[in-house]
Image (cartoon, helix red, strand yellow):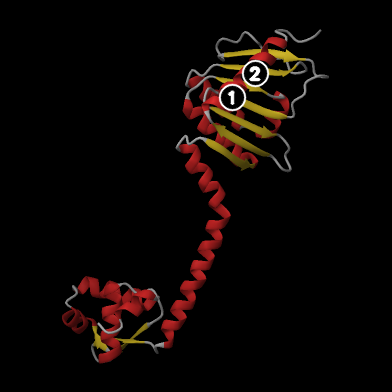
Amino acid sequence: MEYQKIFEEIGLNQNESIVYELLLKEGAMPAGKISKLTELTRTNTYNVLNSLSRKGVLSKYKDSSYIHYEVEHPTALQELLVNKKKQIDNSQSMLTSYIDSLISDYNLSGKRPGVFRFEGKAGLERSYNEMLKDRHDIDIIMDRPRFRSFIGKYNEYFVRSRKRYQMKTRVITPDYDIIDSSDKQDLRAVRYIPRDTFPFEIDLKITRSRIVITTLREENAVGITIIDAEIARNFMLLFELVWNLAKTKPAS
């Protein structure tokens, strides 16, 4: 086929190229004759003809009792290429807008060591979901009312999932939010830091292989996930230090 390579470069597949070149050189003809000359089945022939029509390079007309197919002026191929470029540009723009999120999902799901930044509630929920998949106990430092206000109903899902997977948790929180620190059913232990000296403006969650640190500002919430067992171990040591300094009961 003389033009097959260029036809395929601009967006026609092999069968479309064969049919297009046949009609270009031989002129209009019915589908039955196209099928016979190209050795394509009737079904494949009609599929190809419909596809070429959708691409704007083929038209049809009825002559006597037959429908004939003919190619549009070859400049239609230029239009096809222009449209293909537009689609590629649009796809590239869309991919660029999602690439950070795709990379984050790829890295998080593969448990690859590294540091991954995320934004907003959706990013936070995705990071917490990956933490739940680990099935490890979780140590938490957070301003609980502020966290619940920020994350909304997802908090209920997170707690239910953690309990279902039998993941224990220890929570350090300011003493203006009283939690039952002996709630064995919730697999939770709590200690308190006086509200006036509670230094943290983040939500910090630590497991033996993962750390998630999130700001809780509605307008520009951002966070990072760190997947590294050695770094996680050191964060757990820091948590243990604060845990031992915190109170088992809130200040009166």
Q: How many residues crowd mark 1 within 10 Å: few (<14), some (14–19), many (20+)?
A: many
Q: Are marks 1 and 2 in contact (CB under 8 Å)?
A: yes
| Residue at the disc numbered 2 | 239
Q: CA distance from mark 1 to mark 2?
A: 9 Å
- Res 189 quadrant in image: top right
Q: Decide: is 134 above or below 78.
A: above
Which label belongs to residue 214?
none
- Which residue is at a point 26% across and 79% down the rendered structure image? 18
Q: Quadrant of the N terminus?
A: bottom left
| Residue 177 visible at all | yes
State the SS at label 1.
strand
Left or right of 138? Residue 142 is right
Residue 126 visible in rendering: no
What amino acid does circle 2 point to?
Phe
Q: In which quarter of the view is residue 138 placed?
A: top right
Q: Earlier in the sequence, mark 1 or mark 2?
A: 1
Is residue 76 toward the left or the right of residue 35 in the image? right
57 above or below 235? below
Query: Residue 108: x, y in percent?
Result: 50, 37
* Residue beneath disc 1: 206
Residue at the extreme right? 196
Question: Which residue is pictured at 57% across the width and 25% down the height?
Answer: 232
State the image coordinates of residue 47 (x, y, percent, origin top left). Answer: 28, 72
Q: Position of residue 20 (x, y in %)?
A: 30, 82
Q: Which amino acid does the dot numbered 1 rest on?
A: Ile
